[in-house]
Image (spheres, rainbow, N blue to C red):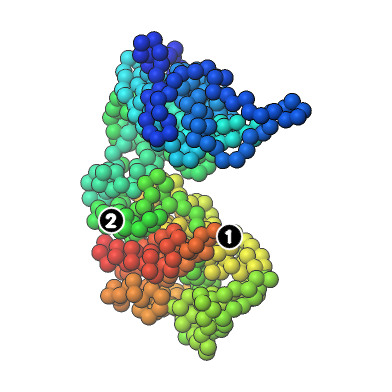
Amino acid sequence: MGKRRRVAEPRKTRPAVVGGVIAVVVGGAGLGGWALFGGGAAADDGPATSAGHKAVKSGPLTAAEVTTAAQRFLTAWQSGKVPAAAAATDDAGAATALLTGYAKDARVGDVTLTAGTRSGGKVPFDVKGTVTYKGTSKPLAYASSLTVVRRAADGEPIVSWRPSVLHPDLKEGDTLVTGESGTPPVKAFDRDGGELTTAAYPSLGPVLDELREKYGKTAGGTAGVELRVVRGTASEKAKLSDKTVLELSKGTPGSVRTTLSPKLQAAAEKKVAERPSASVVVLRPSTGEILAAANSSKNFNVAFQGSLAPGSTMKVVTSSLLIEKGLAEAEKKHPCPKTFTYGGWKFHNDDDFEIKGGTFKASFARSCNTAFISQAKKLSNSDLTKQAQEVFGLSRNDWAIGVPTFDGSVPVQSAAQMAASLIGQGGVRMNPLNMASVAATVTSGTFHQPYLVAPSVDHRKLATASRTMSAKTLAQLRELMRYTAAYGTAAEAMSGLGPDYGAKTGSAEVDNQEKPNGWFTAYRGDLAGAGVVQAGGHGGDTAGPIVAALLGLGA
């Protein structure tokens, strides 16, 4: 990640003063009008023990305690009294660093804080200020919140410090900096030359930020002056890009052309907006071009960077392995008992169904877990990992699509965890981009690394797979997915889209989550897609209609 240039200058602004007194504006139930006071004025001495020591306060916080603790912190912050504000939190060191940087590095002055309605220990508040850099000023306004807790040492009410208290976009290790942006802005365009904006495509915000981070310095633009969130080490590891909070002066944008289809992207945005926590990707199998990518969330790109157990959609990869090793054949009988125990774990099918005398094709189409778990004893611990890496290009961390991605993870595991991996649980982790690529590999016969920006733009080397499936294996795998789309768990979602199609549904159990994540991966002609609806339930009912609707539009 490119770091923004920091320019430290003497602070030229002062806290807002009205009649010689700094005022905290307060509204909302339980907060009333706030008067200014010193650090000890609101302290509650509390009862003393027989030994002369104060008793540690406990129990739920009262409204007065929350109000007083929040008041102490916000008053000191607005007044520019950093030590007092930091002392009103449970992490004075971290609070001091960020509050000091707020004036010195972010160059925010004339701060006014307006509290909202208290809810339990949480107090929302609005922030207004002015950002000034080299004679240019611009107003800043945003909403934040704080939470009051009891201090462990004595039970006193105190603000629980988090970077997000200062600004909601800040995570641990991040900072706010105002200066020349360092990275010029870019305008991103779809494959037809139309500009991509968050107004038209709301979920593309993280992608547009990442395109700027990657191509801003090479796309022909010039930098402006901005207040930005500069990411720290933890955020960089999470592949979060720096974020513009306020633009003081515009730079000259460069331009980047993407592979996105305006028709499919618009449709994808609409479909994910119909469900909470939904993500989808559509790509062209013959080339790897990404035609659409959308998320219900506007803050994190689950479609490219999510890391979730893919459930039974992983059975596409596992089936290719079993067929290659002669452990399964589409039209041959294959066991599907109600349960199967391996490595000390008892694995179940949905509602403990069984298929007596059925074929492997029937087990795949109905998503029989035990049909796969029963073959674990005939596999080595690394077989699935090698299949995912060598045939499907997954789990190697070498994709270069033009923005950051998580490229799937299929670790080598043993015993019950290895068996669970065969059905997309255990340590296996994927996202819609990964699983769309799996479907694309099946329909094209060869892994083509997905990409959002053509490699010719910056001479990137795309990842390749070391081998392909045999013609016999590929033909059977396509038959399994076609049968599932026509007669299996994907039939309702894929209705009317045949005959050149295939699909696989999936559900992935998540700890402490009432409903599983619903997955769906499919192809139709030269389109492949995958989606997930977190905590949605069965993939055929949740993610399936989203993916199928996009495949039905055509390229």
Q: Please identify, in this view, whether the residue under mark 2 or under mark 1 is nearer the observer.
A: 2
Q: Nearer the viewer, residue 398 or 234?
A: 234
Give the vertical position of 181 relative to 363 (above or below): above
Q: Is 123 left or right of 346, judged from the image as shown?
A: left
Seen at 56% across and 40% down, the residue is: 60
Residue 203 in view here: yes
Q: Residues within 10 Å of mark 2 (few under 14, many from 20)?
A: some
User: On the image, which quarter does residue 489 sit in?
Assistant: bottom left
Tell me the kind of residue under disc 1. Gly
Q: Is 194 left or right of 342, judged from the image as shown?
A: left
Residue 148 in percent (x, y) is at 52, 35
Q: Residue furthest bottom?
A: 357
User: On the image, which quarter does residue 427 sit in?
Assistant: bottom right
Q: Earlier in the sequence, mark 2 or mark 1?
A: 2
| Distance (Cα) linking label 2 and label 1 | 32 Å
Say what secondary structure mark 1 lies in. Answer: loop
Seen at 53% across and 88% down, the residue is: 356
Q: Which residue is mark 2?
A: 270
Q: Which residue is mark 1?
A: 427
Seen at 35% across and 58% down, the residue is: 275
Say what secondary structure mark 2 lies in. Answer: helix
Q: Residue furthest right?
A: 51
